Image (cartoon, grey):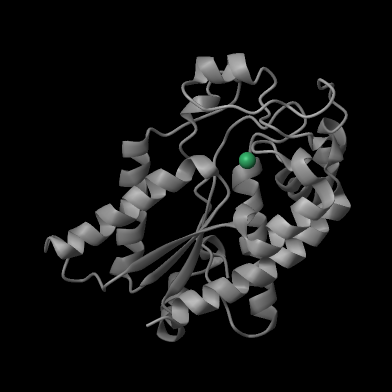
């Protein structure tokens, strides 16, 4: 069930049966010459919608919040189209969203993340949210909340599939795995972008600092990857495996003491 397509009475009914919600979170940033700028947001959104569809068919609805599609991506600003929130803005955004939903009775927030650069900031946001309760500043209306962060790209089965198919060419940014998943989700646009010119072979590896340094080290945007190996077929395999594992992780999170 997508929150955006639900009515408020439907949300009330949902809350009488479940206190859980999936929040896809990603980024809007360059993904090399052949990857979509929305890759990191599109991947968790595709997977969250896929899980919701599967659960709806089984009569066990999962609520999916609107995707938070802009994240912490300051290092990508040397490339056209990239957008960032500074960490403090993102923490405030996540806090406000969790507190809004908690006011209505949601208690377990399952952040399905598509961007490594969000991890530190998201964990800081969770600490800010818990601190509101611990310091006695939380609204009386707010139930105790728990947040968890699951990165789709580090799920065990996803990592196994990527290692098997792409080996070292999967890389660290504009990876074969994430590009494959978006090619599967958006085939028509994939046909357009996949033929773009790119330097041969794997991109180099290295540390990340500011955006000018990033562009100097990684001139076409990739880190360590050769996304020419991305395929729609691999994307479909990743999609099915990831949804299954995410479903199990979500159920365990809701059931935990
Ligand atoms: Ni990415």
Please tell me in which quarter of the rendered image ligand 1 is found.
top right
Answer with the quarter of the image where residue 140 lies. Answer: bottom left
* x and y percentages locating residue 159 in the rendered image: 69, 56
In this orientation, does residue 109 appear?
yes
Q: Is residue 234 above or below residue 49?
A: above
Q: What residue is shown at x 53% (from left), y 27% (from top)?
A: 207
Q: What residue is shown at x 12% (from left), y 60% (from top)?
A: 135
Nearer to me, 20 or 151 = 151
Nearer to me, 13 or 44 = 44
* x and y percentages locating residue 181 in the rendered image: 75, 50
Horizontal relation, residue 21 to residue 50: left or right: left
In this orientation, does residue 14 appear?
no
* x and y percentages locating residue 233 in the rendered image: 88, 54
Specify the farthest residue to the left. Answer: 136
Horizontal relation, residue 69 to residue 163: left or right: left
Q: Is residue 53 above or below residue 92?
A: below
Q: What residue is shown at x 66% (from left), y 25% (from top)?
A: 221
Q: Quadrant of the C terminus?
A: bottom left
Q: What residue is shown at x 85% (from left), y 42% (from top)?
A: 188
Nearer to me, 1 or 9 = 1
Q: Quadrant of the N terminus?
A: bottom right
Answer with the quarter of the image where residue 204 lies. Answer: top right
Q: Is residue 8 above or below residue 174?
A: below
Q: Could you tell me how many numbered marks the image carries? A: 0
Answer with the quarter of the image where residue 201 lies. Answer: top right
């Amino acid at each position: 069930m997508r929150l955006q397509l639900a009515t408020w009475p439907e949300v009330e009914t949902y809350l009488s049966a479940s206190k859980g919600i999936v929040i896809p979170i990603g980024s809007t940033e360059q993904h090399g010459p052949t990857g979509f700028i929305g890759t990191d947001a599109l991947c968790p959104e595709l997977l969250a919608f896929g899980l919701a569809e599967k659960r709806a068919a089984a009569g066990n609805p999962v609520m999916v919040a609107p995707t938070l599609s802009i994240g912490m991506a300051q290092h990508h600003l040397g490339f056209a189209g990239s957008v960032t929130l500074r960490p403090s803005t993102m923490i405030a955004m996540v806090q406000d969203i969790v507190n809004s939903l908690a006011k209505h009775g949601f208690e377990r927030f399952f952040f399905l993340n598509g961007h490594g650069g969000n991890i530190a900031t998201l964990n800081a946001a969770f600490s800010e949210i818990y601190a509101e309760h611990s310091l006695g500043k939380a609204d009386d209306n707010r139930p105790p909340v728990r947040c968890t962060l699951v990165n789709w790209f580090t799920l065990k089965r996803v990592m196994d599939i990527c290692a098997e198919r792409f080996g070292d060419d999967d890389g660290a940014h504009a990876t074969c795995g994430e590009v494959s998943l978006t090619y599967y989700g958006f085939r028509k646009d994939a046909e357009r972008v996949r033929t773009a010119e790119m330097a041969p072979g794997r991109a180099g590896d290295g540390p990340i600092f500011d955006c000018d340094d990033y562009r100097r080290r990684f001139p076409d945007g990739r880190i360590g990857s050769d996304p020419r190996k991305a395929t729609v077929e691999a994307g479909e395999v990743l999609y099915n495996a990831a949804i299954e594992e995410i479903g199990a992780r979500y159920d365990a999170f809701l059931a935990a003491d």
